[in-house]
Image: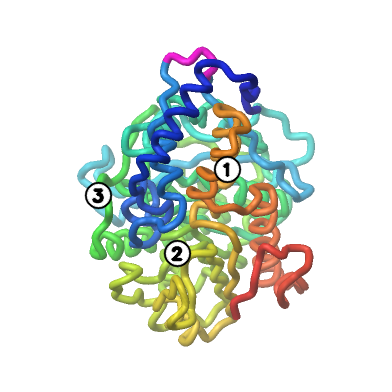
Amino acid sequence: MTNPRPTGTSSHNLTRRSLLLAGLAAGGALAGAGSAQASPFDPGWSGGVDPGGAEEVAGFRQLRAAGDPNFHPVRFALPAPTGRKALGTTAVHLVDRARVDPSMPSGQRELMVSFWYPAGMGATAPFAKYMPARTAVEIDAVWTGEDGLALPAGSFDFGNTVTHARADVPMQPLRHPVILFSPGYQTSRFVNTAQVEDLASRGYVVVTIDHSHETPVEFPGGRFLPGTAQDPPRPSDIREAVDTRTADARFVLDQLERIADGENPDADGKQLPDGFADGLDVRKIGMFGFALGGYATGNAMLADERILAGADLDGTLQDDRLKGPLGDVAEHGLDRPFLLFGSAETQRTEPGKDYYDKSWAAFWAAQRGGRLNLTLTRSKQKAFTDYQFIFSQLFHAIYGEDPIVTSVIKALVGSAKPARSVLAQREYLAAYFDLTLRRRPALLLRGDSPKFPEVRFVR
């Protein structure tokens, strides 16, 4: 639940307002929420200074609430899943013995993944927390530090926020299609939980992956890797990350087959929840990713035919959005379905239009399988993550209904209403995977729909 919103005109609120107005008057420049010069989490593409909202964010960063008795950490309310199935989740520690990594205790590549799945009837257990404790602290620090929004440490109470999934409960005894998820550059696997939970509530098993040494990851026992500090990334860093993520995805696919054969690949011997061996349909596998995760999804499909369908949420398909070079998937396309789902300010396929992205245009021309290109209007890149609703809940909980908050949220994720944005993303992702993995016709994918005017068919 969120904290009560402050009311009245206390001296603290007046101080906040005056600091914000002073910051607005002073102006300043802050890189866009989707650019490589923004926060260390998820540049997605190498853009420049955000032409809209820079002054609002620059002013907001001057706010200080330290010592304010009205300030409390904010727990977030995740949107309820729209499917009918109860949810379970479990974390699994995997070791890839085919890849050497001297920095790991095992001397080999290690990953943490989470399974989100339909739970069996009557499953009872505590609801899982949104993030492990150390991960929560680290990600809060990114947003609250001097290089972030300069909010007090602990503003984002990710560690005490709860999900809709119960921890380690049995899986529903049916075979479920499987979908892999790869997060944005340097971004935790947990910050797309709203999308992941919804797919699981509709009968999918979703496997989210933290890519060690790039994304922050916490292992059993509290061992923590903060991820890469390279910011902004060089094109060579992006290419290396995509290749590593591709190898990670293929390794996870191998482990899914082991689980389906009755094996337990957890490196620490943790028992998998009941029903896993019979609950995975490894003949029906999809994948999607946010930003760099979308690029990695296409690349993984190019390398591994086990992935039957993929979706890219606002990720360029080249190593640098402005300079290239094109990724292999952009050059060669795929023989299986792929969805391009972009924000209002990135990844256009028409030359000469604003936000033209050569990699999306090249992919569109080379794609041999099914293809869709959608735009989420009035949105920025991070609208495709949980920050779509997190920022709204946080700023309103701390700063009340001051109208300047609307400008700040617009500068970070766009002006789309959070509830509508989340619902639209959920409906189109579900319709897409229902069509490509379950062969269920989807009227929603045939053209612009009056039910979702915020989504436009680009092609």
Judge whether residue 162 is colored magenta. Answer: no
Q: Which residue is mark 3?
A: 230
Dot placed on the residue nearer the N-terminal end, 1 or 2: 2
Rendering coords of residue 6 (x, y %):
61, 22
Q: Dot 1 corresponds to which residue?
A: 406
Q: Which residues are magenta?
A: 67-71
Secondary structure mostly seen in the magenta stretch: loop
Q: Quadrant of residue 233?
A: bottom left
Whether residue 33 appears in this view of the structure is yes
Asked if residue 319 lies left or right of residue 358, the reply is: left
Picture quarter containing residue 457?
Answer: bottom right
Pinpoint residue 352: horizontal percent, then vertical percent: 43, 81
The residue lying furthest to the left in this view is 102
Give the residue type that dot 3 points to.
Gln
Name the residue located 35 percent from the left edge and 74 percent from the top edge: 327
Badge 3 element: loop
Q: How is the image coloured?
A: rainbow
Instruction: Tell me whether circle 1 and circle 2 mark residues in contact (CB < 8 Å).
Output: no
In this view of the protein, which residue sits in the foreground, 143 or 84?
143
Figure label count: 3
Q: Which mark is residue 315?
A: 2
- In this view, 455 is above or below 176: below
Where the N terminus falls, by quadrant? top right
Q: State the image coordinates of residue 318 (x, y, percent, origin top left).
A: 35, 71
Q: Secondary structure at mark 2?
A: loop
Type of amino acid under label 2: Gly
Q: Residue at x 59, y 33 (%)?
A: 402
